[in-house]
Image (cartoon, rainbow, N blue to C red):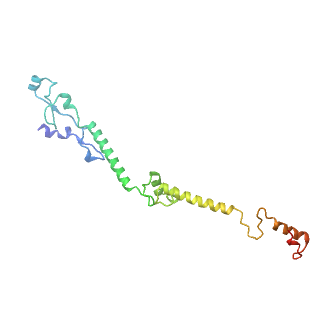
Amino acid sequence: MLEGAGRRYWVPRRYESYYREAITAKDYSQAVPVIFTTLEQLQQHGAGAAVWRRLGRTGEQTLTAVLDNPDGDVLFREQEARADAEDKRRRAAEREARRPVCKRCGRKFTDQRWEETTAHRTAWKAGDVSVCGTCHADDVARKEAAAEADRLQAAAPPEPEDDHVQEPGNLRGLFRRRTWWRHGQPGSGSEDVP
């Protein structure tokens, strides 16, 4: 009768937790422990013996054990820590399952490359978003080498196109021009003098 009438005062509640299914610990912060024994047991065994009972529990316990809440705060912290670790492990496994794979070499993207290809601020300059960081770096190096080759080709002097190209040790063309300017008009025969 006392047990039923005062139930709302002595019954522990469930902890409010994100991991509701994983938590079996009870919240005793609002529960009043109601304990009792008989005078006969106290006289026969003493107050330190296992003669105490607590509403909501079965069996007789010592006074310190009956007032303890082993299924309370300590158990809650342990269960919540285990549930949190399991949740993190599950989320990490789900994330790894979603991690992109390079279409060229088959390796998984690094976190940095994955961020580059998906973040709005960097995706536009990430290049081919279906390749990993190594393959992307190879693409960038190839483009830079091609651009450098184009730049060097544009900066190089043009190849001479006339037929009077001077080769080392061949002074005949140089002499021919000089004689032409010294001796007058073309066709006078003096331009062919060696």
**Snapshot quadrant of residue 181:** bottom right
**At which x and y percent is residue 53?**
14, 32
172 left or right of 34? right
In the figure, 107 relative to 45: above or below?
below
Residue at the limit of the structure toward the bottom, as seen here: 187
Q: Quadrant of the C terminus?
A: bottom right
Q: Nearer the viewer, residue 53 or 127?
A: 127
In the figure, 183 relative to 117: above or below?
below
- Residue at the spot x=79%, y=64% of the render? 170
145 left or right of 129? right
In the figure, 166 relative to 77: above or below?
below
**At which x and y percent is residue 142?**
56, 59
- Residue at the spot x=14%, y=25% of the render? 49
- Residue at the spot x=53%, y=59% of the render? 139
In the figure, 97 relative to 3: above or below?
below
**At which x and y percent is residue 98?**
38, 56
Q: Nearer the viewer, residue 60 or 181?
A: 181
**Snapshot quadrant of residue 156:** bottom right
82 left or right of 114? left
Q: Quadrant of the N terminus?
A: top left
86 left or right of 181? left
Residue at the limit of the structure toward the right, as seen here: 183
Number of numbered discs present? 0
